Every structure is written in structure tokens, then in C-alpha cells.
């Protein structure tokens, strides 16, 4: 068990210096797949206060397109680091920075499609995410279609599915709702570093004193470990026994209400 300190103990002098907020999406900003008005208002308030907000998610390209265009955020890392998107403030055009070369995209898509077909043949009861159609670079498998307990049902075991994906050459990340699998070497942290270097002209490590990350699950592990200031919304406690790196502080509330609590605390300072 980690010693997670309550958000109210976060140093006020540090809170006053925060200029960059990096946030997971599912069950951090959103609540059970929905964006509540209070969470969106919190994003607006952070933006109005001059704080750069970056969403760092396993969510699909289709979602990220909408978020980058319409939400009050500076940029979005999507599909667990496969790309980042931002809206150019001058032209208003969406700019996507991907990490699969244009000449390789057709080959990449074919490989992923073949693996998907074999996966579903091997585990016919698996359910892909309903947003799979809008994903460019990964497979998203619904966590509730696998079992974490050994039983005699027809539901495949989580470890069995993960081992199969690794055997196909895919890397995997587990969020609060999905198993995300891809052929790419990227992850949330590596792409966040590249994004900051390319968009801001600085290294992420050089702005850690004025940056904070907030998340909720296993695929936020590397982000929790890298950031000096990291927050978990209260539902992160379900992963305390499996996270290699834990957040330093934790909100009282879960999911979107936890994000709102965090934003209000930050702005109050």
C-alpha cells in the first residue's frame, strides 16, 4: 500500500506555481464515460486562469479530434502515445503529429487487422471497444469481457489475453476500461515529452516544478513516476497493489468530481 497524502496537504506555494496540467481522460476528467458539466467547467476555469491543459489518454483518434478542436485544452496525446493533436491558433486547422511514417501506415494497418482477426478467432467472446472504428493505431479490448479471477466460465483470463497479445508482438497498457494493444513502441510519457519539446521548445524535465499530472489507473504508471507533482483521483485506490509508481496526493472524490476538486483547489491558491 502506498502512503497517498490528501490533496488538502498539497503545498500551497507549489500550487501557486503550477502552469501546466497534464491529465488522463477516462474516469479522471470523465465519469463512467460521460463528461459532466462540472468537469468541463473546471477545464474552462483552468484555461481562463492561463494554465496550459494537456489531455493524455488512451482514447481514440476520433475522440481526440473533437477534444483538440472543441475543448479548452492546448493539445491531446491519444491512443496511449501513438500521436498528439492540437488546433493551430492562427489557422484553426487541426495538426496531428503521428509516429508511424506515411509510407509505413498501410503495412501497419494490415498487420493490426490480421492480429485483430486472429485474436477474435482465438477468443471469440472478447469485445472490442465500441470506438474501435475511430482508432488509427491500437486495439482496445473491453476490460469487462475478460476475467481477472480463475473460473470455469467461457470468459478468457486477463493474463491469457495479455500473453497472447505479447506473443503477437504487441505492447499492452491497461486502463480503467480497456486493454490497449499496439505494435508501436510509444507510451504516454515518451509522446508527452516529444509534444512539449516540439510545441513549447522546452524539455518536459525542465518544467516539472511548474507541472502536475492527474490520473487514475495502471496506464498512468509512468506518468505518476516521472512527475514530481502527481495527483490521483480517489478511484486510483483500486490499483494500489499493482501500480509500480503511485501518485503523491489523492482527491477525496472519484472520477470527474475528483478532477473538479483538484482544479478548484489549484485555482483557489
Image (cartoon, grey):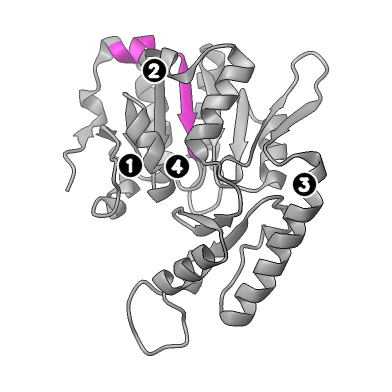
Image location (x, y in percent) of residue 237: 27, 49
Crowd around label 1: few <14 · some 14–19 · many ≥20 (10 Å): some
Q: Locate residue 111 relative to residue 185 in the image: left or right.
A: right
Of marks 2 and 3, the one in the foreground: 3
1 or 3: tag closer to the N-terminus: 3
Q: Are marks 2 and 4 in contact (CB under 8 Å)?
A: no
Q: Residue furthest bottom?
A: 152
**Location of residue 163 with respect to 33 vertically, above or below:** below
The residue to which callout 4 is attached is 28
Is 264 contained in the magenta span?
no
Q: Residue at x 61, y 22 (%)?
A: 74
Residue plotted at (67% across, 44% down): 63
Q: Which residue is mark 2?
A: 208
Q: Secondary structure at mark 4?
A: loop
Which label was assigned to residue 104?
A: 3
Residue 61 lies, in percent from the top left, at 69, 45
Q: Are marks 1 and 3 in contact (CB under 8 Å)?
A: no
Between discs 2 and 3, the one toward the N terminus: 3
Give the mark nearer the N terminus: 2 vs 4: 4
Identify whether 148 is placed above or below 48. below
Q: Sequence-wise, which precedes: disc 1 or disc 2?
A: 2
Tell me where the magenta segment starts and ends, as one range.
Answer: 14-24
Q: Nearer the viewer, mark 1 or mark 3?
A: 3
Quarter-wise, where is residue 103 in the image?
Answer: top right
Amino acid at each position: 500500500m502506498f502512503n497517498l497524502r490528501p490533496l488538502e496537504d498539497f503545498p500551497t506555494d507549489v500550487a501557486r506555481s503550477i502552469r501546466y496540467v497534464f491529465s488522463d481522460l477516462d474516469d479522471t476528467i470523465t465519469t463512467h464515460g460521460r463528461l459532466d458539466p462540472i468537469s468541463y467547467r473546471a477545464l474552462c476555469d483552468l484555461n481562463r486562469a492561463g494554465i496550459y491543459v494537456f489531455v493524455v489518454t488512451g482514447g481514440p483518434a476520433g475522440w481526440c479530434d473533437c477534444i483538440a478542436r472543441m475543448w479548452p485544452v492546448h493539445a491531446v496525446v491519444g491512443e496511449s502515445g501513438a500521436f498528439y493533436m492540437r488546433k493551430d491558433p492562427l489557422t484553426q486547422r487541426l495538426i496531428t503529429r503521428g509516429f508511424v511514417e506515411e509510407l509505413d501506415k498501410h503495412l501497419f494497418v494490415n498487420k493490426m487487422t490480421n492480429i485483430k482477426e486472429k485474436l477474435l478467432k482465438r477468443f471469440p467472446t472478447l469485445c472490442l471497444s465500441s470506438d474501435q472504428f475511430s482508432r488509427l493505431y491500437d486495439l482496445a479490448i473491453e476490460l469487462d469481457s475478460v476475467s481477472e479471477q480463475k473460473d470455469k466460465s467461457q470468459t478468457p483470463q486477463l493474463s491469457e489475453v495479455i500473453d497472447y497479445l505479447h506473443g503477437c508482438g504487441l505492447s499492452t497498457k491497461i486502463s480503467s476500461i480497456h486493454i490497449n494493444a499496439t505494435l508501436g513502441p510509444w507510451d504516454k510519457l515518451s509522446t508527452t515529452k516529444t509534444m512539449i519539446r516540439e510545441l513549447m521548445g522546452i524539455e518536459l524535465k525542465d518544467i516539472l516544478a511548474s507541472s502536475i499530472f492527474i490520473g487514475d489507473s495502471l496506464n498512468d504508471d509512468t506518468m505518476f513516476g516521472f512527475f514530481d507533482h502527481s495527483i490521483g483521483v480517489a478511484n486510483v485506490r483500486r490499483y494500489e497493489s499493482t501500480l509500480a509508481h503511485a501518485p503523491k496526493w489523492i482527491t477525496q472524490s472519484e472520477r470527474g468530481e475528483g478532477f473538479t476538486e483538484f482544479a478548484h483547489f489549484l485555482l483557489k491558491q
